[in-house]
Amino acid sequence: MNSPLKFDFGLGEPEQGFVKVQPDTYYTEQTGYGFDGSGTVNARERQHADKLRRSFCIPVHASFIVNVPNGNYTAAVTMGDAIAPASTTIRTGPGRLAVYEAEAPAGQYIVRSFAVHVNDGKLRLTFSGKAPRVNAIEIKEAPQASTLFLAGDSTVCDQDVFPYAGWGQMLPLYLNADVAVANEAKSGRSSKSFIGEGRLQPILERMKPGDYLFIQFGHNDEKKDEERATLPFTTYKEHLNRYIEEARARGAIPVLLTPVQRRKFNDQGHVMDTHGDYSIAMKELALEKDVPLIDLAGKSAELYEQLGMRHPSRCSCGRIRANLSIFRKELRTIRISRNLGRSGSPSWLRRGYGNCRWSRFICLSGSDLRIIQIRLHKIYDSCRRNQL
């Protein structure tokens, strides 16, 4: 793909250089783009001199697919309505949150840009929200973007039924278009079985210098079956070290994350540490190998205790249910430098409300790491209106 792909959504004639997409523009392998038939799609046309603002589609739980070569892309989506307020949420691929309730007042239009990692030849955007509007989409190749690979278990991976979600699905909300999340985590896997099933190798084949590998295992390493079981201070550390060495050999930066705690309380109302030596062993390895570590086990335990024992519907077995009413409190900016300890290097910047607390913890927990710096920002009125 040498030139950007430009799509004009709605009714009427397309803007020059754009391809028209109407509600009945369905995806086929021959055309290579269109809606997949899920959800509902309507369209409206207003009085406006600009063709890209005159007409738009209203996709409700509908997915738009474009055939592209595998790699990283930047998608810029224009949203708005001349006579009514718009509020649009966008997920990429299998449900990764890229834009949450981006609001445009009546008569105003906004553009949100974000990175998308494609590994199956299809760039998929799924739209929802209180009043979704899509005026235009422009897709460009982004070979300069870093890829943030995730290796982990069910607490990390892309889950099928929202709001049941792994924290990896929410992480893109915190990142700008300089980095694309490739969530390769899989339910039920341990540090051992993830490698044994050949899941690490495809990551390594796509990895390039400047990429990141976030590694969170432990829940299933504690299991007793031969395929998954490891011992914390021997085989667990040995397998984790394999991820570290393989990433570094390709010029990528590994980051260890202690496993999310299980929601299990003692009689005093405190969360029980069910991971025990596994978290300790990971912290030891981080020191031994000089690898950045995010203590997600500690932060998740703090969250469970804040929520208390009477809120099982909001958390389940170490996974966070993305209950938006709980987590719209703080605005955070994450800055991750490509080179350790080097000031002025390129960084990822993204403002947004988190609807998955684990993803926010990844930002917050890194305050003591050389590659992760946190900036706290005031929540301005525009942010209160969820202009992410």
Image (spheres, rainbow, N blue to C red):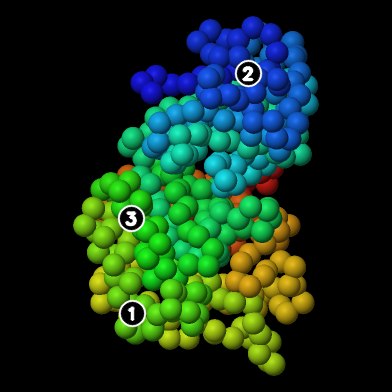
**Which numbered marker is on residue 235?**
1
Name the residue: 21% across, 57% down. Answer: 249
Question: Is the residue 231 above or below the residue 1 in the image?
Answer: below
The one nearer the camera, 375 or 160, is 160
Name the residue: 48% across, 79% down. Answer: 225
Q: CA distance from mark 1 to mark 3?
A: 19 Å
| x and y percentages locating residue 131 in the rendered image | 75, 34
At label 3, counting other C-alpha atoms closer than 10 Å, the crowd grade (few under 14, some 14-19, many 20 or more) is some
Labels 1 and 2 touching (C-beta < 8 A): no
**Which numbered marker is on residue 201?**
3
| x and y percentages locating residue 311 in the rendered image | 75, 72
- In this rendering, would 139 be left or right of 198? right
Question: Is the residue 284 above or below the residue 20 in the image?
Answer: below
Q: Which residue was labeled with disc 2? A: 21
At label 1, counting other C-alpha atoms closer than 10 Å, the crowd grade (few under 14, some 14-19, many 20 or more) is some
At label 2, counting other C-alpha atoms closer than 10 Å, the crowd grade (few under 14, some 14-19, many 20 or more) is many
Dot 1: what SS? helix
Q: Earlier in the sequence, mark 1 or mark 2?
A: 2
- Give the quadrant of residue 42: top right
Q: Is residue 295 visible?
A: no
The one nearer the camera, 95 or 363, is 95
Q: CA distance from mark 1 to mark 2?
A: 53 Å
Q: Nearer the viewer, mark 2 or mark 3?
A: 3
- In this rendering, would 352 be left or right of 87? left
The one nearer the camera, 179 or 247, is 247
| x and y percentages locating residue 57 in the rendered image | 70, 23
| x and y percentages locating residue 112 in the rendered image | 55, 34
Name the residue: 32% across, 61% down. Answer: 254
Q: CA distance from mark 2 to mark 3?
A: 38 Å
